[in-house]
Image: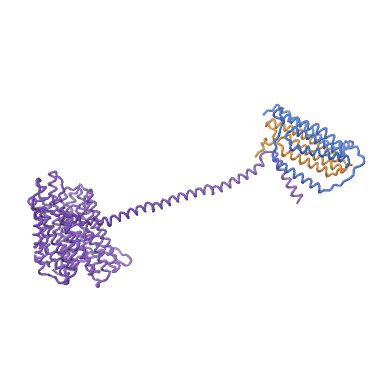
Chain colours: A orange, B blue, C purple
Amino acid sequence: MVPVEHILYLAALLLTAGLAIVIVKRNAIMVLLGIELMLNASNLNLIAFNRLQPDKIDGQMFSLFVIVVAVCEAAVGLAIVLRVYKMYQTSVPDEVTELKD
Amino acid sequence: MSLTSIMFYFFALVAALSAISMVFVKNVFYGALLLIVCLLSVAGIYVLAFAEFVAVVQILIYAGGILVVIIFGIMLTSRIAGKPLLVQHANKFLGLLVSGVMFVLLVYLFSQQSFTHTSLPPQPEKQIGKIGVGLITDFVLPFEIAGVLLLAALIGASVLASTMKSNRE
Amino acid sequence: MNDQRLYSSFFEICLALVVILPWLSGLVCLILPENRSRIARVLAVVLMGLSATAAFFIFISCWNNTPYTHQWNWFSIASHQFSVGLYLDNLAAIMLLMVNLISFLVHVYSIGYMARDDQQGRYFAMLGFFTFSMLGIVLADNLLLIFIFWELVGFSSYALIGHWFEKEAAAAAAKKAFLFNRIGDLGFLIGLMLLWTNTETFNIDQLRNLGEVFSWQTAASLCIFCGVAGKSAQFPLLTWLPDAMEGPTPVSALIHAATMVAAGVFLLARVDFLFTDSSLNVVIVAGAITALLAALAALVQYDLKKILAYSTISQLGLMVTAFGSHAADVAVLHLFTHAFFKACLFLSAGLIIHAMHEAHHEASVHSDVQDIRNLGGLRKRLPFTFVACVVSGAALAGLPFTAGFLSKDAILTSITVWKGDDFSWRWLVLLSTFIVSFITVLYTFRLIWFVFMGKERSTAAMTVQEPPIIMRLPVAFLVACSAWLIIAWNPVDYAGWLYSSLHEGENSHINWMPFLSGGWVLLACTTAYFLFRNGNQYQSELLLNNFYLDRVYHASIGKPLMHLIRITNYLDRTVIDGTIHLAAYGHVAFAHGLQWIDRFIVDGVVNGAASAARGVGLLTRSLQGGKIQVYILSAVMAILIFLLWTLLW
């Protein structure tokens, strides 16, 4: 069987890729995609640890709830992105600088 | 090298490649599509890790629900109809540097640990029944709260989206 | 007369009056405006008359008495006291009388002569001031005071010669007179310094009683003689006197015949104890040269006043020669007589000039009235002037029964005694003196012949009248003084009442001298008659221009001096001014440099600090740009650093 560390390495890769997407991309939708990717990475971590204890289902339950939360967050986030797009006519987060000092 | 290992490495490779190319791709639509690919391969990994229900849920909800909604959002926020939405990259060097360092750090930390490697039970039990029972008994509180959360998100998103037409500022 | 008569307070009052009244007259005439000049004139004459009377009283009291002295403290430097004082002995008394008397006569004369002048106030003021200065020289008891009044006399002479300063010749002549005086005074000052260094006193009485003869006395006395040469027109400083004839004739009479030029001889007489044998030799040579040169020059002049001027120089030379032959009293004697007859001659010349001016004015003709080639045959028109000129001319020539005869006799006697019996260069001096007296007769005769004898030349058609009485009276008085009586009762013995009082000790008398000189003069008269009888003019460019002495001075001293002046002017303008300009430019350049430093370096540092702070601020501010992804990046970086720090350390 595949050692657990490999799954963890993959999860780490997905996490850092999602982080890179969030920082680098100049589009709000891409940022959301990056966030989804990071959530998926954490899910993968949970499932990997769950494989170490096959008689328990804690990992799977946890990841189910993570998916639920991700769904909520994606919905609300998209609504916000659409609102911001309507207001500022741009989907580039750098151009929305109302919080600027 | 058993079949499961090969399949795992295959799915892992697909997921990794799609994730990495998502970083460098400029077209938002391509990014969303790549994310679907990644999610599907992650679902495959879930199956190999004996979490079938989660895998199915992942495909259904993530790939089928969220990504579709996101693609709707892409279509709605592209300024010029017909032309593909292209993004610029900002803070490329710093972002990649930070991510790279984080990856190396994580890999290093993981490699320092030794996880107890247990062998798998010869037969997989029915997970889905366990999950159902667990939802009602052990995890009833998170279950209910998740429901409330969904409700709140539903209402909130509806409110946010519905005032789009009436308030034009 | 008693020897020890006390000086009464009346005497002191007279003394005060004598000194103050001329000064007062000068001041009053200066202050009064020109339209009140009538008052000024009358006042000046009255004050001078009072002064002359007071002088007469003083003379009577002082004659053959112990000298009167009085001193006031002036100032003191360290331990030395300087005082202002009066010293009246026989010499001073006789000089006092002479100066005041002649000044008074000239004042009276000037009222008539300067009647048409428009600056009479200034004229009388300077006359009064001059008299005061001259009295200062006569009465002072120390050499420093004499020097001060010496300078004042020089200044008065300058002011009076340049009375008509609008005429350029007059202004130039005044300058020249002052300059030559100053050159002489330089020597005088050096002499005074030598005197002070060695004796630490200026007082004449104290100097007289020094006792032995010192070596420095030669130098000091020669330096003082320089001052005398400047003032009394001795060789080589004699060219200013002919030019000084540009002044009014009464001024020439007073200053350049009788008093100022005599001040030099007076000074010699005052300090005669300072002169050693060697310095006296120098003095006598200078005097003899002067006498000869001037006499020769006077022979061919055709300007009336210039003849008299050269004659004055020649006579002064004779006085100095007499002084050089160890006979200061003889010099003073000749000074006394010369003052009267020369003043008389000048005033008569003034009469002629005045009469000619009046005649020309009426006939509206202009020519040079002083040129004797234009005059002639005036004895019928101006009889009084003719007589005056003849009598005083006879005194100048040294005809017997005149005062001039006696004083010239005295001079010849003293030189004869001095020369000794051995044959030496001294015989040459005696010979030149005889020649000078010969020539004196010649030019006097020439003067009188050409002006009064013969046919009238340019004045035939004009009406010529004698000048007014007010001008003739002083001349008459002076004519009387040309007679022998003012010196001695005996017309052939010069050792009369005047001389005996001046001279101490035995008189050296040569019995045959009066006859020799009398015969010599008569010989000269006949020679002159035959020479000039036909109106021959003997021309000589050399003598006419006074041996070109002026040109020599100009070339030897004037030109190098002008060259030096040009050089120093150039140096001053380029070097000194250039240095100053350079300093100024350097200053400005330095200021610019400082400004540059201030702007770029000092301000640069400050501005740089400010912009550095701004840059750093901007940098740190950029984290708060409102960019969400930058926030996320910063947060992740912080976490990463934290993780790295804690987990790997």
Q: Position of residue B75 (x, y in %)?
A: 74, 29
Between C300 and C140, which is closer to the camera in this rendering?
C300
User: Looking at the figure, which quarter contains the C terminus of chain A?
Assistant: top right
Give the quarter of the image for residue C286.
bottom left
Between C504 and B153, which is closer to the camera in this rendering?
C504
- Furthest residue in direction bottom, as rendered: C212
Q: Position of residue B35 (x, y in %)?
A: 78, 35
Tell whether B60 sits left or right of C68: right
Q: Position of residue C602 (x, y in %)?
A: 54, 49
Give the quarter of the image for residue C261.
bottom left
Tell whether C538 sits left or right of B35: left
Give the quarter of the image for residue B72.
top right
| Residue C14 visible to an observer of this rendering | no
User: Looking at the figure, which quarter contains the N terminus of chain A?
Assistant: top right
Q: Position of residue A49 (x, y in %)?
A: 84, 43
Tell whether B62 sits left or right of C227: right
Above or below: residue C514 compared with residue B79:
below
Q: How many marks?
A: 0
- Furthest residue in direction right, as rendered: B122
| Residue C598 visible to an observer of this rendering | yes
- Furthest residue in direction top, as rendered: B166
